[in-house]
Amino acid sequence: MTSTRFAVAIHILAGIALHDGEAVRSEDLARSINTNASVVRRIVGLLADAGITRSQLGQGGGSLLARSADAITLLDVMRAVEEPGFFALHRAEPNQQCSLGRNIVPVLEAELDRVSATMEDALAKTTLTDIIHKVEGRVGKPFTPQNWRASAKSRTKIAIA
C-alpha cells in the first residue's frame, strides 16, 4: 500500500473525535494535516460513504463522527479509503515455461493472503479511541476540544496547547 489516504483518514477522524460532537470544518482539519481542504473533503466523502462520518450543513457545519470513536476500528478506516488488498503480484503473468514462473504466483497468493489476514485482525483490534489515547500519551496530557481547536486555527504552528 503506497497511498497516504489511510494515515490522513485516521488524522481526520481523530480531529473530528476531539471536537466531542461539534462539527469540524475541512479547513481546520487541513491545517492540522498540512494539506489542502479539498484533500480532506475527498477523504471525508469516502468515510461518509462507509458510514463512519456524516456532514452537518449550514452555519457551523462540517464533519461529525457517525458512530463513537470506540466503535471505529482501523480496519473500518482502511476499507473505507484504500483499494482492496495490501499486496500486488506481478503486472504480467510469469513465464509458464519456467518451473519457478509457473509456480510462484499460487505460493505468493497463499502467503500474502495469510499475511493480509493477520494484518486485518490487528487493524480490527485497534479503535480510533486507542489511537487518540496513544497520541495523548506522547503529548503528555489529554486532548480537549478547546486546545485542539485553538491549535488548528493557528496558521503558523499546529500543536496542542
Image: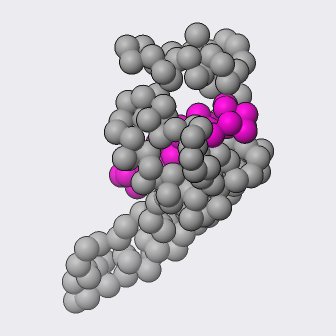
**Which of the 4 image quarters holds residue 17?**
top right
**Which of the 4 image quarters holds residue 144?**
top right
> Is 70 or 32 nearer to us in this picture?
32
Q: Does the magenta-highlighted stretch encompass residue 83?
A: no
Q: Locate residue 68, reporting x and y percent.
A: 76, 47
Residue 3 higher or lower than 116, as above or below? above
Q: Locate residue 114, reporting x and y percent.
A: 58, 66
Q: Residue at x 38, y 47 (%)?
A: 39
Q: Locate residue 149, reporting x and y percent.
A: 58, 23
| The N terminus - image quarter | bottom left
Identity of the residue furthest to the bottom in this view: 97
The total number of labels drawn is 0
> Is 89 or 59 nearer to us in this picture?
59
Identity of the residue furthest to the front in this view: 59
The type of colouring in the image is one colour
> Is 28 or 34 nearer to us in this picture?
28
Residue 115 higher or lower than 23, as above or below? below
| The C terminus - image quarter | top right
In the image, is 137 to the left or to the right of 11? right
**Which of the 4 image quarters holds residue 19?**
top right
Q: Looking at the image, can residue 19 be seen? A: yes
What residue span does the magenta drawing correspond to?
1-23
In the image, is 109 to the left or to the right of 150? left
Q: Residue at x 46, y 60 (%)?
A: 82
Residue 93 higher or lower than 35, as above or below? below
Q: Residue at x 37, y 81 (%)?
A: 103
> Is 77 or 31 nearer to us in this picture?
31
Q: Looking at the image, can residue 138 be seen? A: no
In the image, is 28 to the left or to the right of 127? left
Q: Does the magenta-highlighted stretch encompass residue 22?
A: yes
